[in-house]
Amino acid sequence: MSTTIKPFSWVVRFDVAPLWVQDGFTLTDERLLEMLSRETCGCMSTELAARVLAAPSPLRIAKEQGYGPKTQGSDTEILMIMGGAPHAYADMQKQFKGVTLDKAITDAIKLLDSVAFVRDEKDNTQEVLANLRAAQALIRGDEPISDIDWQPSPD
């Protein structure tokens, strides 16, 4: 029996093996800018802008890095992860007022699903809902973007 390993996904969609996260990797706006500036030799103050719009659960990241729910430093680590990508975790942070891409799609799905004439009439709403759900699966990392056979992190 084969277990499917889910990679970690960020939008900017960027998949990495669980081993990377276990070794300390997490994508933040700053790290993304640094990676882009190294790769392109661009200037972050005049030529490049980047923002993480969607990210894996900060608890999932922290767990992969060895922090359990009751582990010393886990709360601090989770806050650091969320603080590094505030637009990805806006709905989880009180100090940052905003909406996440995932929440906007979730709200649109709920709205369309809740309107009686939309549910009951023969229009293209079901196709729109299917497209929204497919888009949401892509940004959440629920749908693969490659055929990589992801390997679990060694314990």
Image (tube, rainbow, N blue to C red):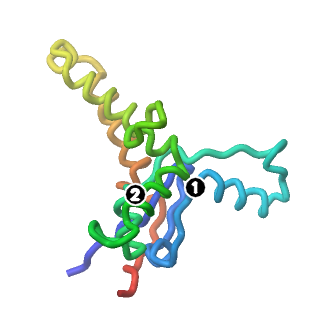
Give the residue pinned by disc 1: 28
Element class at badge 2: helix
The total of numbered circles placed on residues is 2
- Between the residue at mark 2 and the residue at mark 1, the CA separation in whole angstroms equals 12 Å
Residue sitting at x 40%, y 79%: 151
Q: On screen, 132 above or below 10? A: above
Q: Is residue 36 left or right of residue 77?
A: right
**Circle 2 residues within 10 Å: few <14, some 14–19, many ≥20:** some
**Residue type for callout 1:** Thr
Residue 22 location in percent, x, y? 45, 76
Query: Tag on residue 144?
Result: none
On the image, the x and y values in percent for residue 75 come to 37, 60
Mark 1 residue crowding within 10 angstroms, few (<14) / some (14–19) / many (20+): many
Image quadrant holding the N terminus, namely: bottom left
Please tell me whether mark 1 sits on a helix, a strand or a loop: loop
Q: Earlier in the sequence, mark 2 or mark 1?
A: 1
Q: Is residue 114 above or below residue 43?
A: above
- Residue hosting label 2: 58
| Residue type at numbered disc 2 | Pro
Residue 57 screen position, x and y as percent: 37, 55
